[in-house]
Image: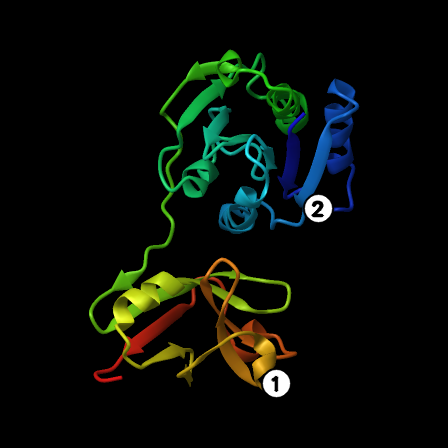
Amino acid sequence: MAVITFISDFGYTDHYVAAVKAKLLSQDAECKIVDITHAIEPFNIAHAEFVLGSVYQDFPEGTVHLVGVDTHGSKNGRYHAARHNGHYFLLPDNGLLSLITDGQPELVVELNAQDPLMPFPVKDLLAPAAVYLAKGGDIEVLGERTTAIRQLLNRQLRLNDHSIMGHVIHVDRYGNLITNITRDSVDTIAHGRTFTIHFGRETIGRIHPNYTQVDDGDCCCIFNSQNQLCIGINKGHAAELLGLGFDSQIDVRFYPGS
């Protein structure tokens, strides 16, 4: 049986997470459930996209990703099962699928729901479908194929010969500012040139291997394991101390010569 991951904005103080897991286990007591997190900010699609998008491909192919974020995503009450890059996703039609797949996923079906206005769709509709897929079921049995999914756009970089403009797309629990500027984008524009990174009132001219390469309290930039440019303060909270957060502008400027 394939792994079922579970990510939600349900939090940890109510019964919602346990109720969904109880439904999964009642469908198959042997199912393997891995919690990604249940601390997604309520209804925050961008937060969910960053967390799920950062980790889902680390799981084996065939993994089923059960998503309980913004669970009543639209008045139409549509819910989808999707296949993409060898993984399955079960989620509301709230735009998250388009962000995770950067456009149209390989295959989407609209789930057959007897009551599209059900009060707890993650438990009553998505969880049974997750177990079915994890046991090797055919996704097309779950509903009719569709291409009508809600489309949202990820933040796009602005690149020219001398600069990259990006944004903070996530602030982690340590206060590190994670941006949508990638190592590939920097390497593509740099061509061996020197560059500086500008954020708020700060300027940094070097990327370090990790945050500990600078003194405690000092600011530095690194590339994380997803090769995204990150700004942090060693043993400090960069977002608070720099006054920056989600969507703050980050610029990389390149200069002639090496």
Name the one closer to the observer, 114 or 171.
171
- Looking at the rendered structure, the secondary structure element under dot 2 is loop
- Looking at the rendered structure, the secondary structure element under dot 1 is loop
N-terminal label among 2 and 1: 2
Q: Which numbered circle lies on residue 217?
A: 1
Compared across the picture, whether 128 is left or right of 146 comes to right
Compared across the picture, whether 195 is left or right of 41 comes to left
Q: Is residue 157 above or below residue 130?
A: below
Q: Which residue is depicted at the point 71% across and 46% down? A: 11
Name the one closer to the observer, 58 or 13.
58
Q: Which numbered circle lies on residue 240?
A: none
Q: Which residue is depicted at the point 58% across and 37% down? A: 60
Q: Residues within 10 Å of mark 1 (few under 14, many from 20)?
A: some
Residue 30 visible in the picture: yes
Q: Which residue is denoted by mark 2 in the rendering?
A: 11
Compared across the picture, whether 7 is left or right of 192 comes to right
Residue 165 visible in the picture: no
The quarter of the image holding the C terminus is: bottom left
List x then y, in percent, for residue 226.
49, 57
Q: Residues within 10 Å of mark 2 (few under 14, many from 20)?
A: some
Three-letter code for the amino acid on which mark 1 is drawn? Gly
Q: Which residue is depicted at the point 61% across and 25% down? A: 126
Q: Is residue 135 above or below residue 42?
A: above
List x then y, in percent, for residue 84.
45, 32
List x then y, in percent, for residue 166.
36, 64
As drawn, which residue projects farthest toward the bottom? 215
Q: CA distance from mark 2 to mark 1?
A: 32 Å
